[in-house]
Image (cartoon, coloured by chain):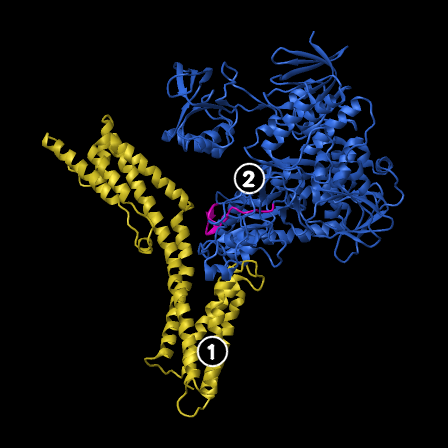
Amino acid sequence: MSMRDSMLSFAGARYLWVALVLVVASVVAYLWHDPIGVPNGGTWLGYTLGTIGALLIVWLMLLGIRKRRYGNRFGTMLGWASAHVYLGTALIAIAFLHSGFQVGLNIHTLALVLMLLVIASGMFGVFAYLRYPALMTRNRDNTTRDAMLDEIVELDQQALALADAVDPKIHAAILRSNERTQLGGSAWRLLRPREDTDSAIDQVRAFLEQKDAEKRKDGQTRDMPTMFAMVDFLSSRAADSKNEALRKLMDVLARKKTVTTRLARDLQLQALMEVWLYVHVPLSFALLGALTAHIVSVFFYW
Amino acid sequence: MGERVDIAVVGSGPGGLSAAARAAELGVSHVLLEAAPHLSNTIFRYQKGKHVMDEPGILPLRSPLPFKAGSRENILRDWNAGVATLKVDVRYGHEVTQVARDADGFRLQCANGATVVAKHVVLGIGMQGNLRKLGVTGEDLPTVQYQLDDPDAYVGETIVVVGAGDAAIENALALAKNNQVIVINRRDEFARAKEGNLRLILRAIEEGTIQCLYNAAPESVEELRVGRKRLRMHVATQNGKAQILCDRVIARLGATAPRAFVEACGVVFPSKDPNAVPAISEKYESNVPGLYIVGALAGYPLIKQAMNQGYEVVEYILGRAVEPADEPLLKAKFRNVAGITSVNALLARIQERVPLLSKITPLQLREFLIDSEIRTPRPGDRIFERNDYTNTFFSIVDGEVAVLVDDAGKQRIALKAGEFFGEMGLISGRRRSASVVAQSNCLLIETPRRSMNRLIQSVEAVKREVDKVFIARALQSRFTPESGIEKLKEMVESAEIRQYKAGDVLFKEGEAGDCLHLVRRGSLTISRDLGGKEVVLSYVPAGNYVGEMALLGESKRSATARAAIATETIRVDGEAFKRAVGRDPLLRLRLQAEYSTRTAANLAMQQIGAGSDIVSFLLTQGAGEATDILLIDESLCVRCDNCEKACAETHHGTSRLDREAGPTFANVHVPTSCRHCEHPHCMKDCPPDAIHRAPNGEVFIADNCIGCGNCERNCPYGVIHMAAKPPKKPGLLQWLMFGRGPGPGESPYDPLKPPSPAEKKAVKCDMCKDLGGGPACVRACPTGAALRIGPDEFIAYAQSRR
């Protein structure tokens, strides 16, 4: 085994070649074959390809069992996954050649559609597996999920303590923001994370602006276009302990924003790598059902 | 004057307790002096409910007191009952501070003022030492503790932690989760703490989760009857006196090492090594006549051994001949050897034939033999194979063996009776450098790594002899494998052993070269300064040499050699080396060939730039001492944790790896997982010697683990856990169809069954050595992200990731 094998490059892409040979052989047979009438599933070639396809589907579904047989010594998971990807893709060709490209509004085409959906979700899976891991590592920046969660809890407490020293209104705003920060939970939340630090930052900023407006009324006329300038301004007046606390609060909130965004992205990426399975696996079982119905009905009405 | 007894026993651990009980049983006048207010302080301090095991199972128990595997509570209860029934004269709170010899025998002075005069003294004080106390009034209050078993047992308390060492910091941090913690530091910084602990405590102090009083000293502690807090502590600080109201004081002030006390009694230790134990006679008598030593202090850390010794030592003191408890075990060892009739005859023959073992006491030899196997291979039997990972040591009592250096078996070296072999694997921790085949009439002693290392550490003469032979053989096999050692005589004489800590520099780029280093344990990195950046060019494992380039052609060092981990080298003098090369044209040719391949490899490495960073990263993770390390390519890892699930499923439900933990660099992730170190830290202090290395290199824990947790503490990589065997899982179909119990890959918790307080044992990665086909974690990875490699492959791995 070379030092860097992925699902696609496993053993010199051995199963790509197996799949290609299978597809090419099927195409050649299809072109060479001269059936009575249009090509369809009822010819000897149709039955042959149908049998190959059905067996392939059953075998592809066995991956779920093989994956859970952790002590199994028959091949590695990498090899199985590689074969699963390539042979699963080859199924598209086999299925269409089997049916002679006939489709209709019937149980047979239902099986075909389900199969295509399963394969499409699987292809998304391959894409996700190749694309997201590196993004996730970059986003993590050498920390762990637990460490990020701990940090958020800690920042929340710090923010509350600081807000307490400033103003009851700010305290309430921070508290509300903390309560509203929700990471994970439903699948939807994982994929579309929401966190509420912005509103807290906005309210602190509004508070600052309000204070500033009051000051301006008292005769001070400095322009305050950005939050950063404000922080600069505040830090220059270190004597005021409230301002000091406000400055710290801004820092804490900014940090929290960074960490929550990162954590949310982490959860999102993980969810992206898992969510397709919730389509792929149930549809596979549906496919198995439709396939059974397809086979039984074909033989029943023979 | 003090009272007079025949036997004074110091320390009521298993050994001392058993000795005092035997004396009481025989009606001999005795006294048992115990510093703590209860028996067997070490076992008393075990965690509540801890299951104590009774290894070694084959050794019979010989003591008036009962002992069998069971909970700490049951064992202590049985011993307390036994002590009461036998009317053992035990004195609690008697800490012996001095043992002096005079005309009457020994005078034992206790900290509480009591004096005892005894004809014989039995020391059974163990290795744990006495915990240092606060030294102020109130130090013995029940809520003033000197250790912490379970930080989670306290919630919502105000706790004062006294001390600035690692133990104090770890306790304070753990307690701060659920309690208010105040640390009292006598100095103005945490100077003794490990870096990681230091960072954590300073952060906690900065954040205010822990309060710290620097330059503060406790003055007294008093118990309060009223109010919400139980204690009041008076503290002297920089700014004057202060009072702290608290619930509990935990003082972690270290322990007074027993060695100083033992040496003050006149007992001599054979070496400065902290693990060394005093030499004692066959009858457990130390170099001070009348002063006997039993138990862990004598080098016998297991409870049953110590109890047997306690019994035997009293018999010996009374002048009775008692067959040692290990006699049947030793007899069984040579049952199949012709011509040996008794244990003593065997011991005599070994000491007469094997010079190395003639330097040790008969008791040491007995112990050595109990751990060892006596082997009588037939001519032609393979004793071990080249490239095996075994690390036992062999002494030849009779006959002859042939050492086959190369695979073809062309180069043979004959070793005769009295010589030894296997020292290379033992010292380097690497694969065997040669195969060994038995010749006629062989009688060999095969000794496990730990017993041999203990012997080397405790007997200086043995160490010298082994080192001398090691140097000669290592130089000869590396430089002149086809001819004898004579040509290298001058080099061997000039050679000496040097030790380096991780990161130490052996020589620097640009220095003048005056010597050559052959690595004998550990490993080195060779690096060059390229544009102000240190670039690692190669990795030099044990068995290879560095520094010859400057001696052969260039006169300046062309690169820097640095110890990757704790390393020992054989330093050969440059002039002697040059003369040897000058005399031997064959050697010159070989060196030149190696020189050019090495230069080419260095050049290739220099060109890949970024790959060098990966190697440096791996080495800073301590991967240099690994023999096989799990790496995860995070550009492929989909975080499915199938590796962990596979590990748990194939190993009694507990995963031995933690995928997520651990650092990442350039998408190379080093998870928390066993590296199967060359010199495994976990093996260091295993009382039943349950940790071994299999021939393919897997370091594993055998079933005779007693669950003491030493390995868990000794492992610097945190890869060992204590775990109990979970209940059996239902089958895949049962889970799938009927929803029975936890499914494959799920944690073994079963809500229908209450968790049983099962005995916990240490578990770690065994590289699935019993499964065949390689480790399950790697086999179960669906994306090819998980990979196990050895340090020799780091460079190739780094290059593959360019």
In the image, residue B636 above or below residue B28: below
Q: Amino acid at mark 2?
A: Pro
Residue A102, position as x, y percentages in the image: 36, 83
Q: Crowding at label 1, few (<14), some or many (≥20) Cα neighbours within 10 Å?
A: many
Mark 2: few, some, or many residues within 10 Å (few <14, many ≥20)? Answer: few
Q: Is residue B667 highlighted in magenta?
A: yes
Q: Position of residue A5 (x, y in %)?
A: 51, 61
Q: Residue furthest top?
A: B1
Task: Chain letter for yellow, please.
Answer: A
Q: Which residue is mark 2?
A: B716
Q: Main secondary structure of the magenta part?
A: loop
Can marks 1 and 2 be said to lie on one chain? no
Three-letter amino acid code of the residue under disc 1: Val
* View extreme (bottom): residue: A36
Tell me the number on the disc at residue A23: 1
Q: Which chain is blue?
A: B
Residue A235 in sight from this viewpoint? no
Could you tell me which secondary element the residue under label 1 belongs to?
helix
Task: Using the image as rendered, state which of residue B473 and residue B596 is in the foreground.
Answer: B473
Q: Quadrant of residue B340?
A: top right
Position of residue B641 measured from the top left corner of the image (x, y, whole percent): 47, 53
**For the magenta stretch, what is the residue range?**
B658-676
Question: Is B780 colored magenta in this rendering?
Answer: no
Q: Is residue B241 above or below residue A87?
A: above
